[in-house]
Image (cartoon, rainbow, N blue to C red):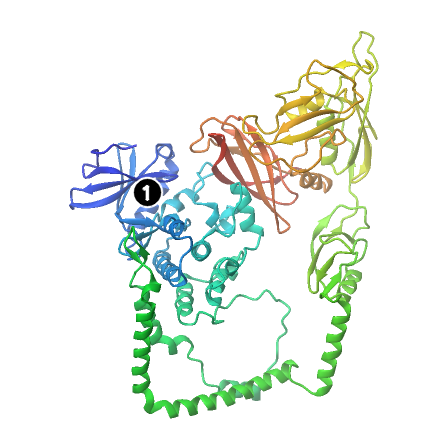
Amino acid sequence: MLKTGMTIAERYEILGKIGTGGMADVYKAKDHKLNRFVAVKVLKPEFREDTTFIRKFRSEAQAAAGLTHPNIVNVFDVGDDEGVYYIVMELIEGITLKEYIAKKGKLSIKEATSIAIQVSMGLEAAHNHGIVHRDVKPQNIIISTDGKVKVTDFGIARAASSNTISSNVMGSVHYSSPEQVRGGYSDEKSDIYSLGITLYEMVTGRVPFDGDTTVAIAIKHLQEEMVPPSVYTEELPYSLEQIILKCTQKSVNRRYEKMEDVIADLKHSLIDPQGNFVKLSSVDNEAKTVVISDEELGEIKHTPKNRGTQQYAPEVADLEEEVYDDDYEDSDYGYEDYEDDDDRRHEERRSRSKNKKHKSSGGSAVTILALLAGAVVLVVAIFFIGKAAGIIGSEEQTDTQKEQTQSTDTAADENGMVTVPNLVGKTEEEASALLEEEKLGKQMVGEEDSTQEKGRISSQDIPAGTKVEQYTTLKYYISKGQQTVTMPDVTGETGVDAQQTLEDLGLTVTVQKEYSEDDGTGYPLVNPGYVDSVTPEAGSSVSSGDEVTLVVSRGLDYGNSVYVPSVVGMTKNDAITTLGKWLDIQVTEEQSTEVAAGEVISQSPEADEAADPDQPITIVVSSGDQAPSTEDTSSEDVSAQSTDTADQSAAAANGEVWKCTQTLNTPTGYQGGEIRLELIQDVNGETKSSKVVDGEKITFPYTLDITGAPGVSEGTLYVSEVIDGQYQQLGQYPITFQKVE
């Protein structure tokens, strides 16, 4: 931290600290060379040792210094002074957009649109220079005291996101695009997505996706649809909502192509708030092509061209004049609200409109005749196209359409709902016929091991008998048949580990607990909690899905009164093994910030008490700072299953095990506390997460040993550390998986 009065590079005198962020502190300084006040952003010490980051940081900051635009905070200088890396920027007196939204709750439509236009113009200038911001959010948008809107922090996000696996996460996940969340390539369209989220927050006062953890929010960006902003702001114009929705499409190809298009639609929305001019890409891939004859094509070619928004040019100019008055209302910061002058501006526009009408009255008759002629040609064109498409036809066609409509109505109940048929065991042809009867769609999403005959449907995402709306799409898997696996030797393993091993092979495990024989010296042949035997025996050939029996030792039989061992402080798996003599171990979870997740908080009966091992024993396991899961756990489910067990089981059953064994370097800012590693993977179009490490202290560099989903070669690893009793994210890293041969 720099002190007041210090001078950097023998030029910039530090006058005081004015802000701080995840990567840098910001100071107000005086540039003695040019005699002006500036803002100096100084990198925090933990980033100064990363030479790769520093190199990219310099390169991107220098590129950002080449940007000059009224809506961008200009960068004047970049350098280092005895290990202090700094950026010198234009000093803006004002507040961030985040603070402004917090103060006002939500912004007026005109105000939000004006800010969005100015932000878009700044981003457009950057994109034209080949610079992508990658961290667009209200915290990086400043509203000056004179009402100007400026975007800041160009370059710093790219330097971090381009770094290696040890790079620090950048930006807020609330505004990150799906491709950024996945750790993939991001470009100008990522900035468009983040701008859409920012605009959503301006008009509603809230972000569309929120959650307790960054991973939870990231998953929502990937797979959940946002609540339309009009739900929170009923007066929101239709056109502005469509702009927000187009900016925030999960598919990159369905967003705006470039910032210029965003600006055009935002300006148009000021003129035509309820207009339907925003073109959202259609997801209907079944639209049929209409063949137009040469005669009809000739008719259409002679139709007058639509001048589009050119006819609105004067109004656009007027509104732009109005927008850039920059009169935000804020008694503390000198802002004035747009609505205060609405009446005056309305009168001005009416006056200008009257003048235009007087000037153009001489040509009005010609214009009307031209419009009528164009309308006639347009009607003729529509008639021909409608006829070719079968929309316009004879009464016989109309009757057929009526019969089809009646048939559709008959298939659905009074609420328009139909019953989902059972597709399991059916061929795809049979399934198609069943779904067509109910007016339902279908999508095959993959193959899986199953007891069903190979090539037949093995499972479906919506259970049979469920009521759904017509034209709902059912997703299903095709059976690959049963795979043959060899029974492993689990001798000497704990019951917990052995059950995990067998289930990873796709086998159905039944656990039995039995007392062991005496080895002749007063000790059991097999210690409590360890494997006694397994059927079928090791080396046998079995099929995935087959049932196997795992016998776990209870040790020697001491009757109905034995001393209870202490398991408090142990991990769940170790506690289950230690209590191997007990027939029924009940496991419950409890949220705790004092006990690490996965460790035992308490037990009943307590340690050293005498108890009957045939009666249930209960252990309470910490869920850390997360709310406990609602799943009921007992000794019938001996192993502590991780959230990705199903994926791992499926991978092994397929004969495929995909592993990641990369080395994770020490995350920037790591303080030596307990770590949580969370994995996100895109599996068959669904985002799945699993905790790899939860509430443990690990030593960096750390070699990963993660089994991922079958056939999925990449994922994103989120690293968090317990700091001040709460998990704080240190970074997110793209990782790769390889099939184990």
Q: Residue at x 33, y 76 (%)?
A: 314
Closer to us: 54 or 688: 688
The residue lying furthest to the top in this view is 521
- Along the horizontal axis of the image, is 301 left or right of 620? left
x%, y% of residue 58? 32, 42
Instruction: Decide if residue 653 is on the left or right side of residue 157.
Output: right
Residue 310 quadrant: bottom left
Secondary structure of the residue carrying tag 1 is helix
Q: Is residue 479 above or below residue 406?
A: above
Residue 430, placed above or below residue 580: below
Q: How many marks?
A: 1
Asked if residue 193 lies left or right of residue 457, the reply is left
Report whether residue 455 is seen: yes
Left or right side of 675 for 439: right
Of residues 504 and 32, which is closer to you in this image?
Answer: 32
For the point 54% across and 29% down, which residue is it? 593
Task: Note whether 213 is above or below 273 in the view shown.
Answer: above
Q: Nearer the viewer, residue 407 or 48?
A: 407
Percent across and percent down for residue 645 are 68, 37
User: What residue did someone put label 1 on?
Assistant: 58
Q: Quadrant of residue 292?
A: bottom right
Place of residue 524 in the rendered image (x, y in percent of width and height, measured from the top left): 79, 13
Residue 499 percent coordinates (x, y): 74, 30
Please rate how many residues cluster around mark 1, counting C-alpha atoms within 10 Å: few if below 14, some from 14 to 19, many from 20.
many
Which quarter of the figure has residue 290? bottom right
Amino acid of disc 1: Arg
Q: Quadrant of the C terminus?
A: top right
